Amino acid sequence: TTVAELQMWAMRVVSDKSLYRPCPKTGELMPAVAVDTENSGAEGPSGLDTRVVNGKAQIVTAGLCLSADGIEGLYVPLNHEDGNNLPLAAVVEVLQPLFDRSFLLFFNSKYDREVLIHACGFTLRPYPYFEDVQASAMVPEPSTGPLSLGDATAALRSGGVTRHHHELHLVAA
């Protein structure tokens, strides 16, 4: 992935109205984008340490995984040993406007939002402009299993959001 490819992808997501769906809570039409962070760093008691110590995040973001349709994805390398990385500042510059106008889907919003904010420098909108599909999967619904990010993005894209619960605000980051 290059910065130019990332820009083209982000512009396609914003301009392709077929990817727009109503935000489950506000009804606003916006793109739905699944976001996942790939990381390494200090191990804390509950996994990778996302704290900021002396102004420096204690985690290294290897890359970002993005999908707007639940079918195709885009991987953005940030800190790979082979050096084939995109500059973080350029990635934030390209993706920040997309994130500012999208409904974001996370598998673990508490963790991924902290990484995006503290380790990458993104500004993210508060709930209700994101959903944690892992938390959604914990709300009992007989006959259905956990949603993956791809399933959740595809459900939003098709207009068939099956797992948005008012209790999610209790776990929102």
Image (spheres, rainbow, N blue to C red):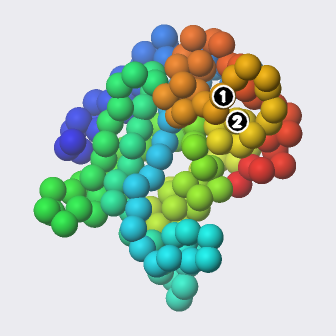
Disc 1 or 2, which lies upstream in sequence?
Answer: 2
Task: Kindly identify the amino acid type of the residue bearing the numbered disc 1.
Answer: Gly
- Residue drawn at point x = 56 percent, y = 69 percent: 47
Q: Residue at x 46, y 78 (%)?
A: 42
Q: Quadrant of the C terminus?
A: bottom right
Q: Please give the name of the residue rendered at 23% of the width and 62% of the height, measured from the top-left corner.
A: 80
Residue 24 vs residue 100, the one in the foreground: 24
User: Disc 1 on helix, strand or loop?
Assistant: loop
Badge 1: how crowded within 10 Å, few (<14), some, or many (20+)? few
* Label disc, if present, on residue 145 of the rendered structure: 1
Instruction: Say if 132 sits above or below 86 in the image.
Output: above
Determine crowd level at label 2: few under 14, some 14-19, many 20+ residues with C-alpha closer than 10 A.
some
Relative to residue 128, is residue 92 depicted above or below?
below
Residue 92 numbered tag: none
Tell which residue pokes out farthest to the bottom in this image: 54
Residue 44 lies, in percent from the top left, at 56, 77
Would you name the residue on which mark 2 appears? 137
Picture coordinates of residue 45, whole percent (x, y): 62, 77
Residue 16 seen in this snapshot: yes
Instruction: Depth check: give the residue in front, 167 or 104.
Output: 167
Query: In the figure, is residue 116 to the left or right of 126?
Result: left
Q: CA distance from mark 1 to mark 2?
A: 7 Å
Residue 57 visible somewhere in the drawing: no
Find out whether the residues at labels 1 and 2 contact each other: C-beta distance under 8 Å. Answer: yes
Q: Nearer the viewer, residue 138 or 127?
A: 138
Q: Position of residue 56 (x, y in %)?
A: 47, 80
The outermost residue toward the front is 143
Q: Quadrant of the N terminus?
A: top left
Q: Quadrant of residue 87?
A: bottom left
Query: Which amino acid, by three-letter code, is at mark 2?
Result: Ala
Query: Which residue lies at the image location 50% right of the left edge and 76% below the top edge?
Result: 43
- Disc 2 element: helix
